[in-house]
Amino acid sequence: MIDTVFHYDDTPIRVSHDCCTDPVGRTEDGLLVRSASAESDTLSTITIGPHENLRKIYVFWSLVTTGEHFDLLYVPDTQTLFVGGGSHSASIDTATMSIIQQNDITLFWAFERRRQFVLELGELECFLYDLHGKLIDEAPVDPPYEINETDGGINLVSIVVGSQWLTFPA
């Protein structure tokens, strides 16, 4: 098991990863986010907040290769958690403990905060969300690709797919 604790502003967040073939019986005290992959083999437990207001989120996903990424981005102002790993990503409202958006993707890479938005990077697709976790736009890509931010949005340029845009709302 790998266990990590970090803080976003004053919010403590603990993440642990464990090998798991079936999350039944291990996730009743929190929200379960489940990948559509039939080969899910990892249960990540995320606890957010101080002990008196502890919220638990479980992510059941597939760690296909050692090159897989698991990433979190927390937006304290909106209490939105972005989580991704393997072939799955999700945005979660931690105040209501509800899933806002889920994506089954080719390979998740990372989240980045860009202005008042969150950019999700992946092997073959990228997504743009508002800070509340609502999907704004998506675009196909192929590696390697360049990322260029403008006032109008994010331009993704790759060899096969060419120039694609994730457009900022007006």
Image (tube, rainbow, N blue to C red):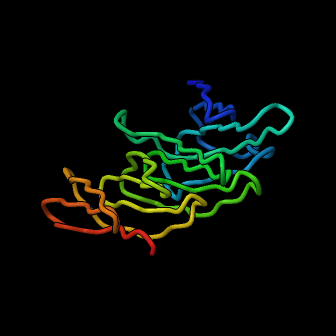
Residue at the image point whose x is 46% and y is 49% from the top: 113
**From the viewer's perspective, is 119 left or right of 150?**
right
Depth order, front residue of 96/169: 169
Query: In this rendering, is residue 97 above or below 70?
Result: below
Q: Residue at x 65, y 31 (%)?
A: 14
Residue 161 in picture, x, y percent from top left: 19, 67
Residue occupying the far bottom of the picture: 170
Residue 74 pos. (x, y %): 59, 45
Quadrant showing the N terminus: top right
Along the viewing direction, whichever of 25 and 50 lies nearer the viewer: 50
Residue 110 spot, x, y in % from top left: 41, 45
Quadrant for the C terminus, please: bottom left
Most extreme residue toward the front is 151
Q: Residue at x 21, y 53 (%)?
A: 146
Query: As drawn, is 122 to the left or to the right of 94?
Result: left
Q: Nearer the viewer, residue 47 or 25?
A: 47
Find the residue positioned furthest to the right: 52
Give the vertical position of 111 relative to 49 (above or below).
below
Q: Is residue 129 left or right of residue 154?
A: right
| Residue 163, x across and y down, in percent | 19, 67
Count the labels in the image.
Answer: 0
Q: Residue at x 52, y 59 (%)?
A: 36
Rendered view: 159 above or below 26: below
